[in-house]
Image: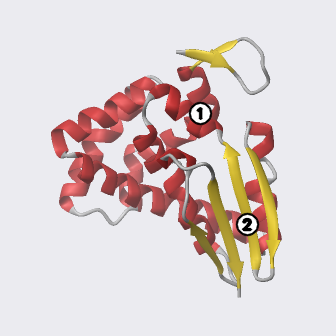
Amino acid sequence: MSDSNSIGERPQSCADRWKELLDWLDFWFQPEKAEAHDFTAPERELFDRLAPAWLAAGPGEGKTAVLDAAAERFGRERVFALLEKICGDETRAHWAGLVRQEGSSLDDLVRLLWEPLPQLGFTFTSERLPDGLRFCVTSCPHHELAVRMKTTDWHYQLVCATDPYVTEAFDPPIRFERTKTLMQGDDCCNHTYFVS
């Protein structure tokens, strides 16, 4: 599969777009990362089988084929649950480090998370609320790639599922709410952040 990238240059394969957007996911599947998670024995078994296959697979369809194979062997819900655990642990740890270095206000969240997104091909609007801020994402390169690959379920688990864990690192607390996602077929992703 190929398509034009967000800059409108030469057609870009799904594998190339995956490398641009999602190559960082390989970090989650390093074998030594297993110790960073409080895995149960069955979760550890699944991770130990999944991680080497993930790292050996090519970008894009290769990665999602690994997830499909694991789902066939271990069950889709079990793979989803493992991805959710990894996603939560890794996202919390990443954002805890960013918050320590960069600040923990709502303005810091916007600067670190939202300001870089238009350069990646995201389109969204924002609205100040009396107690927070709402973003409405109407175009997302992760969603566009997932639709092309017909893997919105896996992409939701790998990308969209990180969103609720981002704000857990902030103090004073920022509460996150989202009721719609492009990845799940809605017309937008509505990210709302509330401050106390």
Q: Is residue 104 visible?
A: no
Q: Is residue 73 visible?
A: yes
Image spot of residue 122 (x, y percent): 73, 42
Asked if residue 91 lies left or right of residue 109, the reply is: left
Q: Looking at the image, is mark 1 or mark 2 earlier in the sequence?
A: 2
Q: Is residue 115 above or below residue 170?
A: above
Image spot of residue 70 (x, y percent): 25, 38
Name the amino acid, label 1: Glu
| Residue 95 figure quarter | bottom right
Image spot of residue 26 (x, y percent): 49, 39
| Residue at the image position 58 percent from the left and 15 percent from the top | 2
Asked if residue 139 lies left or right of residue 13, the reply is: right
Pick the front one: 61 or 190: 190
Does dot 1 land on a helix, a strand or a loop? helix
| Residue at the image position 25 percent from the left and 46 percent from the top | 76
Q: Which residue is mark 2?
A: 134
Does dot 2 land on a helix, a strand or a loop? strand
- Measured in 3D between alpha carbons, the distance from the residue under mark 1 to the one under mark 2, in whole angstroms, is 22 Å
Image spot of residue 75 (x, y percent): 19, 46
Q: Residue furthest front?
A: 187
Label 1 crowding class (10 Å Cα cut-off): few <14, some 14-19, many 20+? some
